[in-house]
Image (cartoon, rainbow, N blue to C red):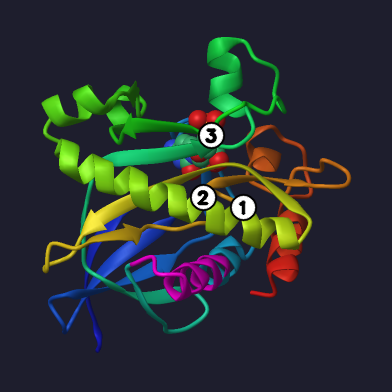
Amino acid sequence: VEKKDFIYEGKAKQVYSTTDENLVIIHYKDDATAGNGTKKGTIVNKGVMNNKITAMLFRMLEKNGIKTHLVDVLNDRDQLCQKVKIFPLEVIVRNVIAGSMAARVGVPEGTKPTNTIFEICYKNDAYGDPLINDHHAVALGLCTYEELAEIYRITAQINNLLKDAFDKTGITLVDFKIEFGKNFKGEILLADEITPDTCRLWDKETGKKLDKDRFRRDLGGIEEAYIEVLKRLGA
Ligand code: C5P
């Protein structure tokens, strides 16, 4: 399979078509953004690290029965993936309250809720990826109720598997965002990435933030945090 044309550029990745119409190449960049693109920067080698971390986690999930878009890692920054039509939804899971939820409902960061919290946001930069509910998603034509039910079912499995995988390395999986897409066969696959860009990861012992909040909140030591996650996962 050969790289063909540039199709699309997101904030952290580029997508290319290939000689196989059902496969794409996803290129991981070092660009970092926060606050819906209002803050811009680069994190040295982030693309290389996030390519490795996503591949390691997606392979672990695949071994445990989760279907993902990942086909192969081609090099330091490129993955061969199944082409999917992305649901314009960000699915967020919160095991510990932090970030936008802490700010929105006035609960201190670090509070452990009695139940796991699922949120969905409408992927729409112009409107700042607003938080929506199931009925909005269906009314907006983003997905059907049946698709949402399947997405939530897979998301719960992913959360259990990821929580365990991080816990073993001494990291609390506070929250994360995932995206799903449909391939040409109509299967719903986990797509996009799972990285310190898209997860909150706190060291279990010290509470140290090992994720993109170091960039968002100007805490410094960003590259070191990503290197630490890579090292702990053995990715
Ligand atoms: O900002 P908020 O608290 O809603 O983020 C929840 C989780 O989703 C965090 O782990 C964050 O990294 C991730 N997220 C993301 N992309 C976004 C918004 C949030 O990966 N556009």
Q: Amino acid at mark 2?
A: Asn
- Relative to 79, 170 lies left or right: right
How far is mark 1 from mark 3, CA to CA? Answer: 12 Å
Is residue 33 visible from the viewing direction of this image? yes
- Relative to 31, 140 lies left or right: left
Q: Amino acid at mark 1?
A: Lys
Q: Residue at x 53, y 14 (%)?
A: 104
In which quadrant of the rendered view does residue 192 lie? bottom left
State the quadrant of the N terminus. bottom left
Q: Is residue 158 above or below residue 90?
A: below
State the quadrant of the C terminus. bottom right
- Relative to 176, 82 lies left or right: left
- Asked whether disc 1 touches disc 2, contact meaning CB atoms under 8 Å apart, the reply is yes
Nearer-the-camera pick, 2 or 41: 2
Q: Which residue is mark 2?
A: 159
Q: Main secondary structure of the magenta part?
A: helix
Q: Which residue is mark 1?
A: 163
- Asked whether disc 3 touches disc 2, contact meaning CB atoms under 8 Å apart, the reply is yes
- Asked whether disc 1 touches disc 3, contact meaning CB atoms under 8 Å apart, the reply is no
Q: Which residue is mark 3?
A: 116
Q: Which residues are magenta?
A: 53-68
